[in-house]
Structures are given as C-alpha cells and as structure tokens.
Image: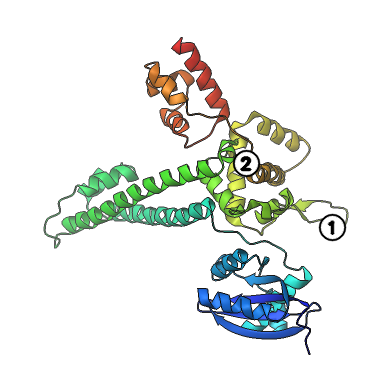
Amino acid sequence: MTDQDGTVTGGVDTHKETHVAAVVDAIGRILATKAFPATAAGYRQLLGWMRSFGALSRVGVEGTGSYGAGLARYLDDQAVAVIEVNRPNRQMRRRRGKNDTVDAEAAARAALNGEAAATPKAGDGIVESIRALRVTFCSLRATRTRVSNQIRDLIVTAPDQLRTTLEPLNAQQRAERCARFRPGHVADPTEATKAALRTLARRYEALTADLDALRGELDTLTTTANPALCAAKGVGPDVASILLIVAGDNPGRLNSDAALAALCGASPVEASSGRTVRHRLNQGGNRQGNHALWRIAMVRRTCDPATKTYFARRRAEGKTDREIMRCLKRFIAREIYQLLTNPPAVPTIDDLRPRRTAAGITLTHAADQLDIWPTRLSRLERGHTRDDELADRYRRWLTQNAA
C-alpha cells in the first residue's frame, strides 16, 4: 500500500480540452494517471487529486506558454511549485512510444530528477500586456507588407498610363494616390486595376493607422516596464519589448546571465577538434531574443566608438566577424541581464519639454542646434525613448539658451 504521507511529484501533459496528469513517488514509481478538463473546475479537481497521494512538492507542466498557461497560473496561485517541462526529444519518443499518459509520466519524472528545472513565465503583469500587443503588431505589420507588395505587383502589369504615374512613388505615396481613385466601369482593364488598387490602398492605410496606434501603446508600456533597458545603447522600444517578453514578468527565474545567453541562443558552444580549439554560435534558444541581441550589436558596431575599437582589436587577433559578433552578443547578454533583473534608476526627463516651451524655443530649432532629427527629440521629450547622453546635452543647451 502506498504511503500517503510521503512526498509526491506531479506531471501534466496539456491539451486544449483536457489535461492528462500523473503522480510519481519519491523514487519515480507511477502512482496513478488521470485526465481532467482544461477548465477552472478541472484545475481544482486535478490539484485535489494530486494532493490525495501525499505532500505535493512540485508539478512539471508541458506547454506553460500555450495550453498549460491557465493551469500554471492556477497552481502558482495555490503556492505549488511549477516546473516548465519541454517535450521529450524525438529519439526518446521513437524508442518509448508516444501517448498522453506517457508524456505526463515523463513530465513528472523530469520534474522529480531535476532534468527540468526552469520556472515558467508568470504571465500576470505588464510584460504579458506587451506580449499580447506585440503579437498583434507583428501580424499587422506582416499583413501591411503583403498588401504593399500586392500594390507593387499590380502596378507592374498595369496599363502604361497608370504604371508610369505610380512606379516612381514610394509605398506610402502609392497608397495615398490609389486611395483617391474613382474607377469607372470595371469591364475596362484600366478601371478594374484602379478599383483593385483603391481597395488595397485603403486597406494599407487602415493597417498603417492601427500600427501607429499599437506602436505608441507598446512604446509607452515598454518604457514604463523598464526605463533603464530602453536607455541602454542600441536598445529602442521595439528591441526592449522583445527582451522583456523573453524574460517574462518574473525575470528572476533566470538565475544568471549565462541562463539568459543560453535562452537567447548567444552562449558559446564548444566546437573543438584535435589541435583546433574554438567555439561556434549557438543555433538554439529563442530566435527573437537572439535577433534583439544582434540588432543591439549592429547598432553599436556602427555608432559606438568603444565597440568599433573592440571589433578592430579582435580582427587584429585573427578573429572573423562572425566570431567577434558571437563574443559581442554574449557580452551584451550579460549587460541586458543586469538591466532586466536589477535595473538602475534613470534620470527623469519630465522637465525637458516644459523648459523648452517656457523659453519659447521650437522643437525644430532645438533639434537643429543639437544636430539631430526633430522626431528623435520629440520622442525623448515624451518618454518614448531613453538616451541619457542626449538628455544631458539637451538639458545643458536649454540652460544656456534660457538664460
């Protein structure tokens, strides 16, 4: 008979409508398996069933970022340690077979033996809001690109009068011109092309308006969530939002900068053989996070004098650009980890716009004197971007000219 006072570990294979749960004892023996509905009532039944076998130490859950998100949040609210479990590798599945019960048992054993030890994202704060908005933003951006390409392709095969008028224009200008078309009878190819272009152009303009609104909301949320991250060199609101989503609402779940580097696919991987001692790029991890680190590295490589010096020194040592970029991304991951887990306070910029307007200085004049674009200065004043060096230079210039 099973000792009901012993410690047990749970495992759950999650699906859209049902979750299959398993319970193992302290030495990994299966005690029972059972399916529960993927509803709030089902979550309560699942937890009560697991606790009936003994003191529940932890629960390994597959798919905490998809079908298991609701269950993971419920278990966390009930003070149950939740472990994120990846699906078994393909080789193991071919050897052992595949069904929901086997996956639930594997999740329980992975949580028990420490094979799975990652804490799932909390998904209950401002970063979750950023993630939801960014999913829609990326979808709209991709849709607008497809619409723009369709307009371009229709112009290529349009009658000469339309083609010669529209081809020299850029995407935005084409949309504005085509949206004003008043086509006649569509039996005529020219009029039919105008009708098609007008429909696509109006859709392009609607998507642009939605994108602008979402971009403003994302910039505000990102700056509110972590102003220090947005103030880092080479990091704008878009890159910052990606990194925040990678870390989640509970970045403390990443116990070191090496964990963040591995999560973003920027950790060095041994690729040595014989007399050759080298590392290669990590091709795994979160590819969006890897892309964010790459964007930061490319901006710094172009604009940051210290990074330019670093590239020149490593090239002189015989390193290739690919190897230098790998080293730079790993260094950036270390910096980003500190900004995510222990962000420093950043100077306030709320005084910039009031001081400029009180001195009667226009935004365009200030931007000309600072040798920057007015849009960049406007975004700085509104808090949509952070640049401490520019803010200090702007504040000193205002002090001199206000006097």
Residue furthest top in the image: 403
Q: In this view, does 192 lie to the left or right of 80?
A: left
Q: Is mark 2 on a helix, strand or loop?
A: helix
Image color mode:
rainbow
**Is 393 or 147 nearer to us in this picture?**
393
The residue depicted at 25 percent of the width and 48 percent of the height is 163
Q: Badge 1: few (under 14), some or many (20 or more) residues near its Cα, within 10 Å?
A: few
The residue depicted at 44 percent of the width and 33 percent of the height is 382
The residue that label 1 is drawn on is 273
The disc at residue 297 is 2
The residue depicted at 23 percent of the width and 49 percent of the height is 179
The amino acid type of the residue labelled 1 equals Ser
Q: Does residue 64 appear in the picture of this structure?
A: no
Q: Residue 4: give x, y in percent of width and height.
A: 75, 82
**Is 30 or 279 nearer to us in this picture?**
30
Mark 1 or 2: the one toward you? 2
Q: Does residue 271 appear in the picture of this structure?
A: yes
Residues at marks 1 and 2, CA–CA distance in whole angstroms: 29 Å
Q: Which quadrant of the rendered structure holds the N terminus?
A: bottom right
> Who comes first in sequence, dot 1 or dot 2?
1
Q: How many labels does the image show?
A: 2
The amino acid type of the residue labelled 2 equals Ala
Q: Is residue 140 left or right of residue 44?
A: left
Q: Residue 76: give x, y in percent of width and height.
A: 62, 64
